Image (cartoon, helix red, strand yellow):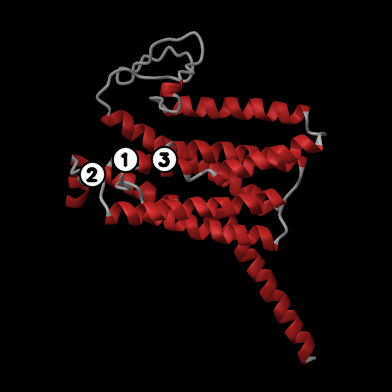
Amino acid sequence: MEDENMDQLILVLNQLVLWVAAGAMMFGGVVPYVPQYRDIRRTQNAEGFSSYVCLVLLVANILRILFWFGRHFETPLLWQSIIMILTMLIMLRLCTDIRVASELNTKRRAFAATDSKDEEIKVPKKFFMDFDLKYFWLWSRFMDYLQCVLTFTALAAYITYLFLDSSVFVETLGFLAVFTEAMLGTPQLYRNYQNKSTEGMSIKMVCMWTSGDTFKTGYFVLNQAPVQFSICGLLQVFVDIAILFQVYYYSRYPQKPVSHTVHTTSAKAL
């Protein structure tokens, strides 16, 4: 009798651990962006955060969702992608609004042709998409980012539909999805290198990246997720560690004087 009760208790505990792990997988990925979001809103300065991080995660999670149609993986990972896409759109909305509000240059950029009559954001009418690489993903309205994401999603979904029966295509799609996500930290890594500083970047966000990616990689291994997930998870951890090294290096060996902008001053006053 006691053995049966013990077995039931172990079974319940195992199920509880699985539920907690699944919840952590679904929502844990967005937690690192909470302090960054709050910092950007508080300082009204998005200079330290690379919007290309949002681009990388949007592409990666859209491809991962499409990969699910060709090869089903665990449902928590699917929900994680959906939640992450919504989170990145929220981050993009905030960064775009703040950047445009503080931008002195009156010339605006758009993803697609527009007849906008907005007095504050005057976008010149175009007859085709603005694919000028110099201004790609630096548009002046959130709607332009949304149009780009929807266009990419529709195109990728159509190609996936055509080649869904090809195992080579499906496996390649899965690899591209997780490899793109593994490169998540590289835009931030490059921006820090360009600025020779990590000022404006949330260190809490990077620490949460590292802990979350470590947990996620372990989750992939233990749950026997597709091998692409595990390999690229390890790569993602290495990139996170490289960013943490930048934090240490640039704080110990400053490459330029710490800027004292109006945003930083007002934030401290608050």
Amino acid on which disc 1 is placed:
Asn
Residue 13 percent coordinates (x, y): 67, 75
How crowded pointer 1 is (Cα within 10 Å; few <14, some 14-19, many 20+) is rated as few
Instruction: Give SS at disc 1.
Output: helix
- Of the two numbered discs 2 and 3 on the same chain, state the one appearing first in sequence: 3
Q: Answer left or right for 240 relative to 248.
A: right
**Residue identifier under label 1:** 195
Q: Residues within 10 Å of mark 2 (few under 14, many from 20)?
A: few
Residue 56 pos. (x, y %): 52, 38
Q: Residue at 57% across / 61% down in the picture?
A: 215
Q: Which quadrant of the view contains residue 64?
A: top right
Q: Residue at x 43, y 19 (%)?
A: 110
Residue on which the image places disc 2: 256
| Residue 263, quarter of picture | top left
Q: Mark 1 or mark 3: name the one nearer the start of the chain.
A: 3
Q: Which mark is residue 29?
A: none
Q: CA distance from mark 2 to mark 3?
A: 16 Å
Residue 30 percent location from the top left of the image:
50, 51
For marks 1 and 2 on the same chain, the one whose residue lies earlier in the sequence: 1
Name of the residue lying farthest toward the bottom: 2
Name the amino acid type tagged 2.
Answer: Lys
Residue 190: which numbered mark, if any?
3
- Measuring from the top left, give residue 94's x and y in whole percent: 38, 38
Mark 2 near mark 3, Cβ–Cβ under 8 Å?
no
Does the residue at mark 1 contact the one at mark 2 (Cβ under 8 Å)? yes
Q: Answer yes or no: is residue 31 visible.
A: no
Kind of residue indicated by mark 3: Tyr
